[in-house]
Image (cartoon, rainbow, N blue to C red):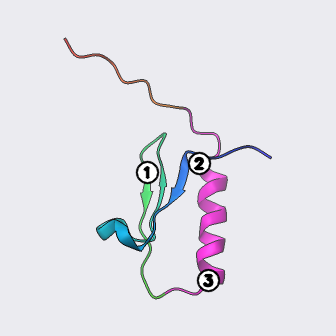
Amino acid sequence: MIATDWIVSHDATQGDLAYAMECTRCGVVQQIALPISVDCYVAMGKEFTKYHKHCRPQIKEALG
């Protein structure tokens, strides 16, 4: 199994990102419309992870 600690699921304290899924490597955020069943949320999380599990870290270029 590939570790995917760069893929996060935000909790309810995140304001506009509440319950959103985010890939911190490529920056894609999947917002979730509530209410949603747990089964559907888990399925969405699996698909999001499947799509982003091979994202590479972004290299930030120095300005100047």
Dominant secondary structure of the residues highlighted in magenta in the image: helix
Which secondary structure, mark 3? helix
Which secondary structure, mark 1? loop
Q: Earlier in the sequence, mark 1 or mark 2?
A: 1
Callouts 3 and 1 close, C-beta under 8 Å: no
Q: Which residue is found at the position 41% from the left and 45% from the top?
A: 27
Residue range of the region highlighted in magenta in the rendering: 36-56
Mark 3: which amino acid? Val
Is residue 43 within the magenta segment?
A: yes
The image shows residue 1 at horizontal and vertical percentages of 80, 47
Circle 3 sits on which residue? Answer: 38
Q: Which residue is found at the position 43% from the left and 24% from the top?
A: 59
The image shows residue 12 at horizontal and vertical percentages of 41, 74
Question: Which quarter of the picture shows residue 61?
Answer: top left
Q: CA distance from mark 1 to mark 2?
A: 9 Å
Above or below, comparing residue 46 to residue 23 in the picture: below
> What is the number of the mark on residue 52?
2
